[in-house]
Image (cartoon, helix red, strand yellow):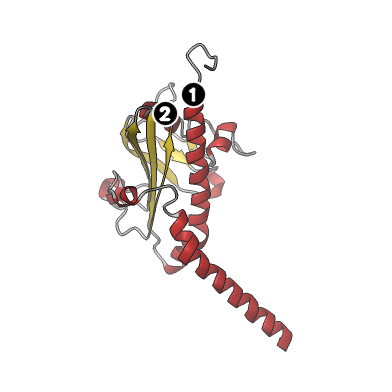
């Protein structure tokens, strides 16, 4: 390896280290609590204890000009559409992720305790989540296997809080556990940014759908 090549490699290495440092010290703290208040990030939520010794925890939130039940109607659509081998459905596209319900209970499109949802096609290797807690209009907790014994690898909590007449705070908390240092580094530098992009699109998509539904009366015409 020539001197010029060594210098280039060293420069690239230093640039990479600087970029990683900037992300961990500045960008990660920002996106890990995007839209959430200090009170929301510090308040315990159902499902927090399903992951023992979580190595990653994020809390994000958004205000929606719609009552909790109207927002809930959007949340329970998770997995109602299917994911095919070509790509995401229209529902998945506006939601910002691909979710497939594996074992739907009933034909009304409602989520039930134990329903399984996958964040993409089976070949993606992404984990399967199950409905571990469901309190209509208030809380939905999705978890990988093991929540019954508090040994889940990841949980995804959706909490709805009324904040005024016709307004709701939608809070999303994602927790996971990395078993090795390599997994932790990969999750910090790759997994968490992807999860942020997914959840940001999800929060905005739910807000758009819920607020749009509120502006359309039962007759189907806008006021």
Mark 1 — residue? 213
Question: Tag 2's secondary structure?
Answer: loop
Tell me if I can see residue 111 in this picture. Answer: no
Q: List the single residue furthest toward the bottom.
A: 3
Quarter holding the N terminus is bottom right
Q: Residues within 10 Å of mark 1 (few under 14, many from 20)?
A: some
Residue 200's spot in the image, x, y percent? 50, 45
Residue 102's spot in the image, x, y percent? 46, 35
| Residue 46 left/right relative to 2 | left
Verify CB contact (< 8 Å) between mark 2 and mark 1.
yes
| N-term-proximal mark, 2 vs 1 | 2
Residue 186's spot in the image, x, y percent? 50, 63
Q: In the image, what residue occupies the spot 48% across and 45% down?
A: 199
Q: Residues within 10 Å of mark 2 (few under 14, many from 20)?
A: many
Q: In the image, what residue occupies the spot 50% across and 70% down?
A: 21
Q: In the image, what residue occupies the spot 47% across and 60% down?
A: 28
Residue nearest the observer in this picture, 214 or 185: 214
| Residue 179 left/right relative to 205 | left
Mark 2 — residue? 66
């Amino acid at each position: 390896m020539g001197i010029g090549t060594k210098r280039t490699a060293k420069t690239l290495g230093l640039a990479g280290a600087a970029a990683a440092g900037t992300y961990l010290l500045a960008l990660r703290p920002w996106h890990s609590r995007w839209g959430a208040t200090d009170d929301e990030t510090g308040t315990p939520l159902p499902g927090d204890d399903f992951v023992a010794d979580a190595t990653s925890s994020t809390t994000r939130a958004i205000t929606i000009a719609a009552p909790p039940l109207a927002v809930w109607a959007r949340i329970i659509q998770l997995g109602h559409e299917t994911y095919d081998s070509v790509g995401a459905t229209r529902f998945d596209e506006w939601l910002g992720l691909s979710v497939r319900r594996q074992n739907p209970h009933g034909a009304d499109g409602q989520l039930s305790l134990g329903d399984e949802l996958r964040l993409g096609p089976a070949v993606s290797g992404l984990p399967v989540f199950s409905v571990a807690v469901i309190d209509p209009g208030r809380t939905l907790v999705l978890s990988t296997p093991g929540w019954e014994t508090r040994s889940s690898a990841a949980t995804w909590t959706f909490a709805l809080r009324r904040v005024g007449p016709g307004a709701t705070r939608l809070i999303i908390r994602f927790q996971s556990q990395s078993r090795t240092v390599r997994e932790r580094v990969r999750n910090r530098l790759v997994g968490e940014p992807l999860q942020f992009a997914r959840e940001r699109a999800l929060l905005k998509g739910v807000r758009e759908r819920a607020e749009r539904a509120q502006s359309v009366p039962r007759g189907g015409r806008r006021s």
